[in-house]
Image (spheres, grey):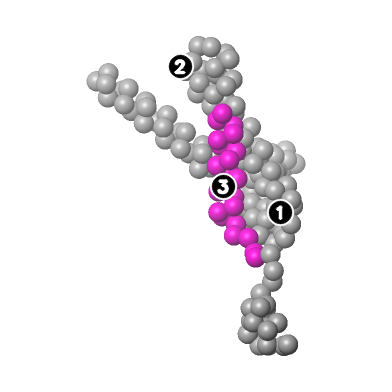
Amino acid sequence: MLALGLLLNIAGIGLFCWLVVVLAVYALPLFVAVNIGLMAFNSGGGIVGALLVGTVCAVLTLAAGQLAITLSRHVTLRLAIAAVFVVPAAVAGYHVVFALSQIGVPSLAWRETFAWLGAVCIGASAFTRLRIISKTRPIEPERTGGEPSRPVLTAAANEG
């Protein structure tokens, strides 16, 4: 029975860590949803209204971020928008790994080291997931009409 309990604890912690990594990209929309939902509840919107407003704001935040990354042409602008999503995920990752490391790591220095490594890994995972979720446009717009596009060297050779 003891071995089964240990295996279930390890599986539960592993599942929790997997969920943290997978859901890290949603840290900013969750933060927005909680704050807007609390504001709606405190202004008299009720529980249902607060949940509805918070959910709509979370979805709009995520959609706006993905749309902004998709439509932006400059790499620095894409990185800045992604940083807005990655920083809360990294902070959440730091705190989760720090709390989990308190279970089996007695040294504060090692707990901090693991927490910083967790923040970097979860932030990188959120950045990667954000890039995968929102496909970016090509740098040059596609031609929409007229003649089919020809390679530059072929076009230059034919004109001369």
Verify whether residue 73 appears in magenta: no
Secondary structure of the residue carrying numbered label 2: helix
The image shows residue 76, relative to residue 21, as above or below, that is below
Tag of residue 1: none
Mark 2 or mark 3, which is nearer to you? 3
Q: Pinpoint residue 56: horizontal percent, then vertical percent.
A: 64, 52
- Check the picture and name the quadrant holding the C terminus: bottom right
Q: Which residue is mark 2?
A: 104
Q: Of label 2 and label 1, which has the lower sequence position?
A: 1
Q: Of label 2 and label 3, which has the lower sequence position?
A: 2
The image shows residue 23, relative to residue 93, as above or below, that is below
Q: Which residue is mark 1?
A: 75
Task: Check disc 2: other Cα within 10 Å, few if <14, some if 14-19, many if 20+.
Answer: few
Q: Which stretch is magenta? A: 117-138
Q: CA distance from mark 2 to mark 1?
A: 41 Å
Q: Pinpoint residue 7: horizontal percent, then vertical percent.
A: 31, 26
Q: Which residue is mark 3?
A: 128
